[in-house]
Structures are given as structure tokens and as C-alpha cells.
């Protein structure tokens, strides 16, 4: 059951856990997935948790072992994705891994779809359904998404002989796994490569995927990186936008003499509930070259609402901005943004970080002042990154979830912090914030969601204790109500 002790939250799984995700279901339960290292390698497991925090799987004898969904001979974890259909069946997109010519387990292989029933039954069997073509070697992640017509779409990268992704493949399948249509992006210049960023639903069963487009500079020593999006729809999955020859739209374009989006950065994407999307992209600022976050909105027809690259989350360009997370105020069509800000101070220089929240109205105007609300100040030198985890929308308010920065000497005493803020930018809880995790551990792979009744949130994460022998990684979860109360 849910714990009322932030120092000892509910254990979902233990020992060598990696890449956990949490997804709410329409019956007020939660599906939690993770990868675990075992005899086979990093395989995929799943657990179902009810509204009271009871683990439900396996059905006959619930335990923290959960249900093995997909076994892999792969000695490292990889990213994957989770989506639910209208009957609360779970679909997972994941790479199979493969044995290289040298005999080594290797990331990639085939794109695989798994399906799990609300009772934990493997509806596509233990091996799932292979989605990719026989001759393709894919690049993870395999993204999965439920389309507005109830079918399921998947997308992934395809590697060339040099090991770079130069094609993005997308399929739509029915709920039984039968392919409805397939699409592959066209040829790109030699030396350019792609990185799949997101897959989202649009109207009439169409889908929109975004990707990072990387090109070498003229001298070949560096790369520039932009963000593009493409919409696929109709009965054959053909491109729906016709502003360019390949049907793509530039969301962010690097400024002249700047490199654009830094390697390893993933722009945030959120449907606007009208067939369009918000994008929050950390990219190079035109004058200073510092990394700032640009907010762009695109409508269902592929038209950009804001000017080139979008609007900045703040006009402060001297601080580096990163890790944006988004959620929509559905009633007012406003957008909540939580992001990380860092600044170098002192001699010798030390990096200080803070979490900052902002609210934009539907026209893109800042509502919480020009600088937003600083949830943590800049008084603690960075030990481990103080990163945003989620913004969770309630009626008329939003719950910010983040990791506050901790000093290097306290890197294994990292809390998870929450705060409920109304649309005016005022704190609702008298204490300002509530920590949902206070145990003396490092946090890995944190995620958060709201239950379907919008009465409480659940945060899940991996507790990492590297000082233990052997290393211990435990998957935990904690609820918190709109009143800031833990447990039942």
C-alpha cells in the first residue's frame, strides 16, 4: 500500500533495475515498467498498482518480481515506450537487441511490439510481434503511441552500414498487431543523420513524429543540429504537410555561426488538444550562443504560430536553460513549463542550478512574470543535477515535481520535491513544498503522473545506492494528494 513515510516508499521491484516508466490507466490503476539485468540480459518487466498502492501482478501471487514481458540477450539497458488502448491493454515498443558479427550482444536488432492485458497476459506472446523489415537494423528507441482512431502507431530509426540513422520508419497497426500502413523517410545527403525525438497523435488517426536533423559543417569538423516534424495520415500513411518536398516542417533551425541543439538534448513535445503541438527546444541563442529554451506551437496544418524558432521562455540569456517538461491547462489552453537553469559563479568557478516554472497563455504571453517562479535558489553548488521531473495539471493548478540541487558531498541524499501552484503563480500548500522522497539515495529515471480522477499524483523512481556491495537499485513509488498528503 502507499506509504505515508517519504523515507520508505512503496517498493515495486529491486536489484539491478533500470529505465523505469509509469503510465496511468482509465481504471485508476498504474502500469509501471522497467528493465532488469538477469541471466538473459536487460529484459522488460511490468507491474500493475491499484489506487491504494497494492501490487496486483502476477494475478495468482502478486510480488515485486512483476511479470516478465520480453526477454533479451542484451547486456545494457535501452529506452522504450509505453501506450494504452481504449480497453487498458498495454503496448510496448522495444528493440530486440542482436548478436553482432563479433558474437557480442548489441543494441538495436528488430523493432518489437508487445501487448499486455489488464490481467498481465502476454497477448502477443513472449516474443512479441516484429514490426521492422527483415533487412533493417534499427536504432532505439521504438516509440509507441495510441492514435485518435484507436489504432497503435510505432516509430524507430533505421541504421545504415556506418551505424548512423538515416531513415525513420513509422507503422500503424490495429490492436491485434496487423499492419495498416508503413512509411519510411526518404534519402538524405551522405554524412547527415537523424535521431527520432517524439511520436504523437493528431486528428483523424494521423500521427506526427519529430526528429533531430544533424549535418556536418562546411569544414566537416563539427555538426549543426535542428528539429523537424512530419505528419503522416490517410489510408496509406503518406505525408500530410506540403510546405516542403519531403513534407517536413522546421521547428527549430540553428542560427548562423551556432551549432543549434546540443548532442544529447531531447526537445519536449506536447499535443495542444486541437490537433497541433507545443515544442520546447533548448537551442543556441542567436547573439550570446548560450543554450536557451524556445517555445514553438504548430497547428494541425503544419503552420507555425510563432516567429522563427518560437518565443523564449525568458529574455534572460546569460543563464543556461535545459530539461524542459510541459503540461497543458486544458480549460484555458495555457501551457505550464518547468525547466532547469544553471549559472557558473565564483573563483574557481562552480555550477549552481535552480528549477524555474512559467505559465504561458494560449497566445504565448508569460503569466508568471518575465523570469517565472524560481522553485529553488542558486545557493547550492551542483553535486548531481537538480532536474525537473514533471508538471502535472489539475483543475486550476499544476503540481511541479523536481529534483532540487544537492551539494557533491550530499549526492546520495537527494530528495524529490513537489509543489502545487495555482494559475496566478501562487503556492497553494502552506509549507510551499512537500518532499515525497527523503531516503539517503540517489534518484535515477524518475517519472510522475496523475490518476484518472485527478485526485492525486504518483511519482516513481529508482533508488541508487552505489556505496552498497553489490550495487543496489530499487524501484519505488509514492503517492501525494492535491492537499500535499502522502499515503492513504
Image (spheres, grey):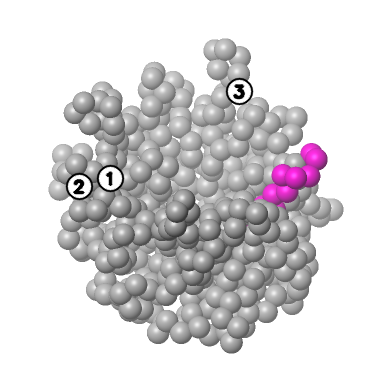
Q: Is residue 240 visible?
A: no
Q: Is residue 461 magenta?
A: yes
Left or right position of 22 against 178:
right
What residue is disc 1 on?
A: 260
Residue range in magenta is 460-470
Q: Is residue 193 visible?
A: yes
Q: Nearer the viewer, residue 144 or 443?
A: 443
Q: Quadrant of the C terminus?
A: bottom right
The image position of residue 353, as x and y in percent, is: 47, 60
Disc nearer the start of the sequence (1/2)? 2
What residue is disc 2 on?
A: 255
Q: Nearer the viewer, residue 160 or 476?
A: 476
What residue is disc 3 on?
A: 105
Q: Secondary structure at mark 1?
A: loop
- The residue under the point 70% across, 75% down is 486
- The residue under the point 34% across, 35% down is 194
Q: Secondary structure at mark 2?
A: loop
**Discs 3, 2 touching: Cβ within 8 Å:** no
**Discs 1, 2 touching: Cβ within 8 Å:** yes
The image position of residue 405, as x and y in percent, is: 55, 61
Amino acid at each position: 500500500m502507499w506509504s505515508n513515510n517519504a523515507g520508505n516508499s512503496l517498493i515495486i521491484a529491486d536489484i539491478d533495475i533500470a529505465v523505469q516508466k509509469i503510465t496511468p490507466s482509465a481504471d485508476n490503476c498504474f502500469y509501471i515498467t522497467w528493465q532488469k539485468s538477469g541471466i538473459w540480459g536487460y529484459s522488460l518487466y511490468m507491474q500493475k498498482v491499484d489506487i491504494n498502492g497494492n501490487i496486483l501482478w502476477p494475478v495468482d501471487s502478486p510480488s515485486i518480481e512483476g511479470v516478465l514481458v520480453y526477454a533479451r540477450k542484451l547486456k545494457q539497458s535501452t529506452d522504450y515506450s509505453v501506450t494504452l488502448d481504449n480497453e487498458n491493454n498495454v503496448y510496448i515498443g522495444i528493440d530486440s537487441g542482436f548478436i553482432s558479427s563479433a558474437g557480442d550482444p548489441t543494441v538495436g536488432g528488430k523493432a518489437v511490439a508487445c501487448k499486455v492485458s489488464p490481467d498481465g497476459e502476454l497477448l502477443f506472446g513472449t516474443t512479441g510481434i516484429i514490426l521492422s523489415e527483415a533487412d533493417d537494423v534499427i536504432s532505439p528507441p521504438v516509440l509507441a503511441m495510441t492514435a485518435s482512431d484507436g489504432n497503435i502507431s510505432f516509430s524507430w530509426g533505421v541504421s545504415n552500414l556506418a551505424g548512423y540513422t538515416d531513415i525513420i520508419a513509422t507503422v500503424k497497426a490495429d490492436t491485434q498487431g496487423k499492419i495498416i500502413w508503413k512509411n519510411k523517410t526518404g534519402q538524405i545527403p551522405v554524412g547527415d543523420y537523424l535521431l527520432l525525438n517524439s511520436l504523437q497523435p493528431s486528428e483523424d488517426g494521423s500521427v506526427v513524429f519529430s526528429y533531430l536533423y544533424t549535418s556536418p559543417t562546411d569544414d566537416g569538423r563539427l555538426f549543426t543540429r535542428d528539429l523537424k516534424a512530419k505528419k503522416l495520415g490517410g489510408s496509406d500513411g503518406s505525408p500530410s504537410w506540403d510546405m516542403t518536398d519531403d513534407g517536413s516542417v522546421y521547428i527549430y533551425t540553428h542560427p548562423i555561426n551556432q551549432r543549434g541543439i546540443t548532442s544529447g538534448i531531447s526537445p519536449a513535445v506536447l499535443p495542444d488538444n486541437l490537433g497541433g503541438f507545443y515544442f520546447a527546444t533548448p537551442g543556441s541563442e542567436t547573439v550570446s550562443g548560450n543554450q536557451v529554451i524556445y517555445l514553438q506551437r504548430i497547428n494541425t496544418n503544419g503552420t507555425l504560430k510563432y516567429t522563427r524558432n518560437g518565443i523564449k521562455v525568458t529574455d534572460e540569456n546569460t543563464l543556461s536553460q535545459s530539461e524542459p517538461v510541459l503540461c497543458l491547462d486544458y480549460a484555458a489552453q495555457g501551457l505550464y513549463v518547468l525547466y532547469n537553469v544553471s549559472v557558473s559563479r565564483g573563483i574557481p568557478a562552480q555550477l549552481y542550478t535552480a528549477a524555474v516554472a512559467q505559465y504561458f497563455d494560449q497566445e504565448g504571453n508569460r503569466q508568471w512574470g518575465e523570469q517565472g517562479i524560481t522553485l529553488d535558489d542558486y545557493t547550492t553548488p551542483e553535486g548531481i543535477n537538480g532536474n525537473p521531473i514533471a508538471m502535472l495539471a489539475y483543475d486550476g493548478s499544476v503540481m511541479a515535481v523536481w529534483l532540487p540541487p544537492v551539494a557533491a558531498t550530499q549526492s546520495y541524499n537527494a530528495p524529490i520535491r513537489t509543489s502545487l501552484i495555482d494559475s496566478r503563480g501562487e503556492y497553494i500548500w502552506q509549507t510551499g513544498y512537500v518532499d515525497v522522497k527523503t531516503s539517503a539515495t540517489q534518484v535515477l529515471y524518475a517519472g510522475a503522473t496523475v490518476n484518472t480522477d485527478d485526485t492525486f499524483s504518483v511519482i516513481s523512481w529508482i533508488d541508487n545506492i552505489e556505496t552498497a556491495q553489490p550495487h543496489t537499485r530499487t524501484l519505488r513509488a509514492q503517492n501525494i494528494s492535491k492537499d500535499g498528503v502522502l499515503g492513504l
